[in-house]
Amino acid sequence: MTTDLQTKELQEPKMRLGRIEFIALIAALMAINALAIDIMLPGLQEIGASLGVTNENHRQYVISAYLFGFGFSQLAYGPISDRFGRRAPLLIGLAIYVLSALGAALSPSFTMLLAFRTLQGVGAAATRVIAVSIVRDTFGGRQMAEVMSLVMMVFMIIPVIAPATGQLIMLFGEWHLIFAFMAVMALAVTLWSFFRLPETLHPENRRAFTAGSVARGFGIVLSNRVALCYTLATSFMLGALFGFINSAQQIYVGIYELHELFPLAFAAVAATMALSSFLNSRMVGRYGMRRISHIMLVIFVIVSLIWLILSMRDAPVPFPLFLVMFATVMFCFGSIGANFNSLAMEPLGNVAGTASSVLGFTQTLIGATIGAIIGQSYNGTTTPIAAGYFVLGLIGLICVLIAERGKLFQPHNSPAPHVVHVD
């Protein structure tokens, strides 16, 4: 059966998945990854106190351990899903996520907690790699960017509500319940995927799972200038974002003394990212991925430079000004992320699973490493974070210039919609 999701429904025997449900399910798959990070933030202080962590910056390892497990394991899921299809590897990854979240809830020591968090990241990697692969199986060009923007808009709801959810859980129980909540949410997504998600990789498009085929797939990805440079640009900018996430509780509570208002401030900034993703989905078909993302990247760098200069004064940047500047750069990031990922994946449809794994591995590993360095550099000011945003944004801009041979803001012709074959 052949169908185009832009106008019809994705179908499989005994299974029907409309376009809206398709977007919602892909967003939910990606959202449980964001949930595993953002819902933890209000509980980091209690986790540290409960498990004997004396160094404030070491509490950030709860985030970093998850990200490293998430990053490395993406290398495996892509080639496996290109060989065996999308559904089975996805469901296995979700099962690992659920079980490791329950293990983390029962952890008696900080070391064991970090081990289960790493394993949870291993499971979550399936949702990132395979969700993007499913979208690429189904769409191409600007349509992929539009769908990914809508996915990111729904996905961004999680950073808006997750910290507040974590704070609410902490009001009625201990930090262990946060992990139990994650397990329940992931189980719900697992059942939804099991009963409703069809296989989107047609048998004739499957690749042999051999060392040679995997190496060739990686070679295709790494030798494509556009894919590689946009992947690196995204990686460096994610480093800035992860650096802030690692330090968010210390900045909002330690510097600005927001305490119980911390989730509200975090949600306000996340909401700007969701708004940006929505606006991008409405405009990308008219103006193109490059024009929108390049403009947003330039604004990102300029505002980050202003933030860095102001943060180097003796007194902290006033909170209203800090919030405006930070919300502005994250609004830009909301459009940059979806478009850069689509631009990186666009020329790699014939190896979508392997491509998604290489891109995800590179972005997460570089981003998590840089984010951990920035987080551990926290010194009671926002200067390390502001410096990270400016320097990494500038490096991202250089990568884009290399990808585009020095020409920014140039729209390209959109290719014909990609057609998916579904058994």
Image (spheres, rainbow, N blue to C red):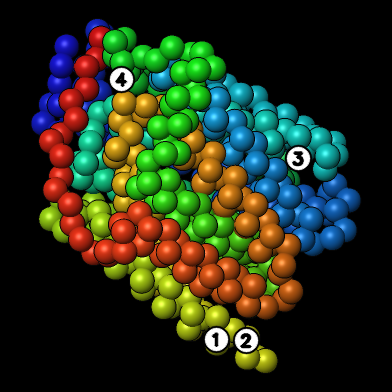
- Name the secondary structure under disc 2: loop
The x and y percentages for residue 137 are 29, 27
* Amino acid tagged 3: Leu
Kind of residue sitting beneath label 2: Met
Crowding around mark 2 (Cα neighbors within 10 Å: few <14, some 14 to 19, many 20+) is: some
Tell me the quadrant of the picture where the N terminus can be found.
Answer: top left
User: Quick check: 134 above or below 69?
Assistant: above
Q: Amino acid at mark 1?
A: Ile
Task: Give the camera-side residue of 181 and 109.
Answer: 109
Q: Earlier in the sequence, mark 4 or mark 3?
A: 3
- The mark nearer the N terminus, 2 or 3, is 3
- Marks 3/1: CA–CA distance: 36 Å
Could you give the CA–CA distance between mark 4 and mark 3, rounded to whole angstroms? 35 Å
Q: Which residue is mark 2?
A: 312
Rounded to the nearest whole Å, what is the CA distance between mark 2 and mark 3?
34 Å
Q: Residue under label 4, please give it.
A: 200
Choose the circle earlier in sequence order: 4 or 1.
4
Q: Is residue 342 left or right of residue 232?
A: left
The quadrant holding residue 372 is: bottom right
**Sequence-first tag of 3 and 1:** 3
The residue that appears at 87% across and 58% down in the rendered structure is 54
Q: Alpha carbon of mark 4 to alpha carbon of mark 1: how far?
A: 49 Å
- How far apart in space, not on screen, are marks 2 and 4 (Cα)? 51 Å
Query: Looking at the image, how many numbered discs can be counted on the residues?
Result: 4
